[in-house]
Image (tube, helix red, strand yellow):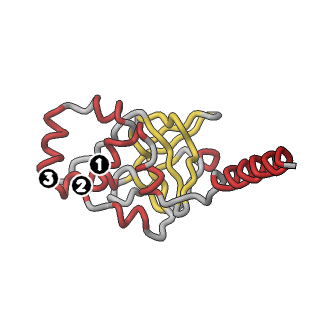
Amino acid sequence: MLKRHFVFAVAAIAIVAGCATTSQPVSLADTIAARPQLSTLNALIVKAGLTDTLKGAGPFTVFAPTNEAFAKVPAKIMDALAKDPAQLKAVLTYHVISGKVMAADVKNSNSKTVNGANVALSRAGDFVTVEDAMVQTPDISASNGVVHVVDSVLLPPAKP
């Protein structure tokens, strides 16, 4: 009898544990924060004061550079961004477009970023690019949009 109760208890725990892992998507900010390969981007989002925006209603599409992508940016540029919050915000918002654009929906065209400048999006089969950045991991759903992990940091065009 005790053995049967033990088996039932173990089965109940397994079912509850399985339910706990099937949660609803979280915000873009939380989705980015939860991914170790995006820790540099997450720190910069916090520094630029964009966390609340990326937790907001959206929807937004974020092209999220990896830590390796940020490591390729010259130190001089990263230092300048660290000292200029407005420029940092301009660079980060250049990685965001309004609306939820899944990889399969990408058309070969330009899209206006939250920064105000345009980025070139293109798709060839399963390959998606934004400017010169290749999407490495597409379609990470969030409650207020989608994240596409990219291999390069996009720098907006200089304003005249």
- Neighbours of disc 2 within 10 Å: few (<14), some (14-19), many (20+): some
Residue displayed at 35% across by 35% down? 67
Decide which of tag 1 and tag 3 comes sooner along the chain. Answer: 1
Q: Secondary structure at mark 1?
A: helix
The residue identified by callout 2 is 47
**Horizontal and vertical percent for residue 150?**
44, 38
- Neighbours of disc 3 within 10 Å: few (<14), some (14-19), many (20+): few
In this rendering, the answer to whether 42 lies above or below 76 is below
The residue identified by callout 3 is 84
**Residue type marked 1:** Ala
**Horizontal and vertical percent for residue 138?**
56, 42
Label 3, label 2: how far apart the Cα atoms are: 11 Å
Disc number lying in front (1 or 3): 1
**Horizontal and vertical percent for residue 89?**
26, 56
Decide which of tag 3 and tag 2 comes sooner along the chain. Answer: 2
Labels 1 & 2 near each other (Cβ < 8 A): yes
**Residue type marked 3:** Asp
Q: Secondary structure at mark 2?
A: helix
The residue identified by callout 1 is 43
**Horizontal and vertical percent for residue 69?**
35, 33
In depth, the one of 16 and 93 nearer the eye is 16
Q: Residue furthest front?
A: 1
Q: Secondary structure at mark 3?
A: loop
**Labelled disc at residue 72:** none
Q: Horizontally, is 96 left or right of 17 in the view?
A: left
Disc number lying in front (3 or 2): 2
Residue displayed at 76% across by 53% down? 12
Q: Horizontally, is 88 left or right of 136 in the view?
A: left
In depth, the one of 146 and 106 nearer the eye is 146
Label 1, label 2: how far apart the Cα atoms are: 6 Å
**Residue type marked 2:** Lys
